[in-house]
Image (cartoon, helix red, strand yellow):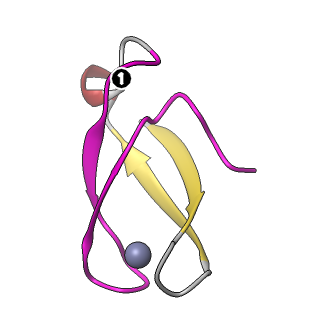
Amino acid sequence: MRAFTFACQITNLIVQEWIDDDKYCATENEFQCFVCLACSRLHWMNSRLENS
Ligand SMILES: [Zn+2]
């Protein structure tokens, strides 16, 4: 498991998600869907590009 943090575009809150290693994006061109804990919507993001 890896921690991934991003800034929610809707609420501007910093959200931390945990990702299983096998779901982690393999390349910087891949996107995966997160259920946002801040706004409860789905965000498509690349888990390699962290907003820290
Ligand atoms: Zn959000």
Query: x, y percentage for residue 23?
Result: 26, 29
Identify the residue under disc 1.
25
Query: What is the three-letter code of the residue carrying label 1?
Result: Cys
Q: Which residue is more in the foreground, 3 or 36?
A: 36
Query: x, y percentage for residue 2?
Result: 49, 37
Quadrant containing the N terminus is top left
Up the image or down, 42 lies above or below 47; here it is: below
Q: Residue furthest top?
A: 27
Q: Quadrant of residue 37?
A: bottom left
Residue drawn at 54 percent across, 45 percent down:
3
Q: Is residue 29 left or right of residue 35?
A: right
Helix, strand or loop: magenta stretch: loop
Magenta-drawn segment:
28-52
Q: How many marks?
A: 1
Q: Quadrant of ligand 1?
A: bottom left
Residue count near mark 1 (Cα–Cα under 10 Å), binned few <14, some 14–19, many ≥20: some
Q: Which residue is more in the foreground, 31 or 25?
A: 31
Up the image or down, 44 lies above or below 46; here it is: below
Q: Residue furthest right?
A: 52
